[in-house]
Amino acid sequence: MSQLFLQILWDWLREWTSLLRSPCFPVLFSLSVYMCCCFPYICLDLLCSRLALVRRFKIQPQSKVTWAATWRCLCKISRNHVCFIFPLSVVHWYWKPVVSPPVAPAMLAVVKDVLACLLLFDTQYFFWHLLHHKVYWLYRFFHKEHHVYTATFSLTTEDTSVWEMLSLSFFTTLNPVLLDCHPLTEMLFFIANIYLSVEAHSGYEFPWSPHRLVPFGLYGGAQHHDLHHLKFKVNYAPYFTHWDRLFGTLHTQKKSRNTETLKRMCLSDSATTDED
Ligand SMILES: [Zn+2]
Ligand SMILES: [Zn+2]
């Protein structure tokens, strides 16, 4: 059944071969998937100040998304896509023309390859990110731009320096090539990768958020990355938690709450001692 669905989907996509093979396709695809992933969160940001129900799910309810910040992000994203992603996708189109085999991949292969690409991207980004926080000049010139906001919102996902955007695009493009993925799997990985990075920056935590669906705290998600923007020296991995756990940089909301309680206890203790 799932195989039939993938075959129907792939056959339908192959009818658009001329579009898929166009040098403009990667940039249009990336921009439209990104905006579609951001759109529901932009609507929530608009409703947030009016509806307490929406505010309940906001990780930092006191933070507000301004029009100025939204406009700034939109301008930067458009500029980066036109000036950098588009010329690079033309190079990529020339270097690796799109092939469209007649048979769709098996569902199990799709799941396995998408997961492998995500794990690989998570590893590459973890070390890239750690290095850009540890080496001062790398942080100052290449990563600082992404840390303008301590409370993120969906459009801040791609609010990065050109170097950061190119590095991440390079990892994203490289992984399906390394794993020799089917073009349909490659496309599904791009969609999953864009969605998960937008979700991580959304600033919202829902009962159906990915980190609640993955067991044993293996997945970080929005709260994990929000703490990175807030506390700065923790949670370097974009999605999963194993690398931060291994390097001792994992910080959870529970840990954060315990530290705050401890701080408050210490403060009240010292106030009592002062009074004595
Ligand atoms: Zn960072
Ligand atoms: Zn971020």
Image (cartoon, rainbow, N blue to C red):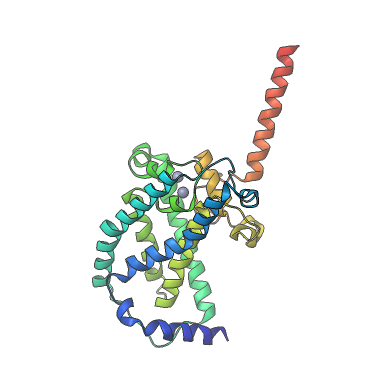
Residue displayed at 30% across by 54% down = 79
Left or right of 57, for residue 159 = left
* Residue placed furthest toward the top: 276
* Residue placed furthest toward the front: 50
Q: Quadrant of the N terminus?
A: bottom right
Front in this rendered view, residue 17 or 168: 17
Residue 203 in percent (x, y) is at 54, 50
Front in this rendered view, residue 75 or 224: 75
Front in this rendered view, residue 201 or 215: 201
Task: Please indicate, yes or no, whether residue 120 appears anywhere in the rendered image.
Answer: no
* Residue placed furthest toward the right: 276
Residue displayed at 40% across by 74% down = 180
Residue displayed at 64% across by 62% down = 213
Residue 102 in percent (x, y) is at 39, 88
Question: What is the count of numbered marks?
Answer: 0
Left or right of 12, for residue 46 = right
Residue 158 in percent (x, y) is at 40, 53
Task: Kindly indicate the quadrant of the structure image that contains residue 25.
Answer: bottom left
Q: Is residue 28 above or below residue 270?
A: below
Q: Is residue 66 above or below residue 218?
A: above
Task: Please indicate, yes or no, whether residue 63 appears anywhere in the rendered image.
Answer: yes
Q: Quadrant of the C terminus?
A: top right
Task: Kindly indicate the quadrant of the structure image that contains residue 216.
Answer: bottom right
Residue 134 in percent (x, y) is at 42, 40
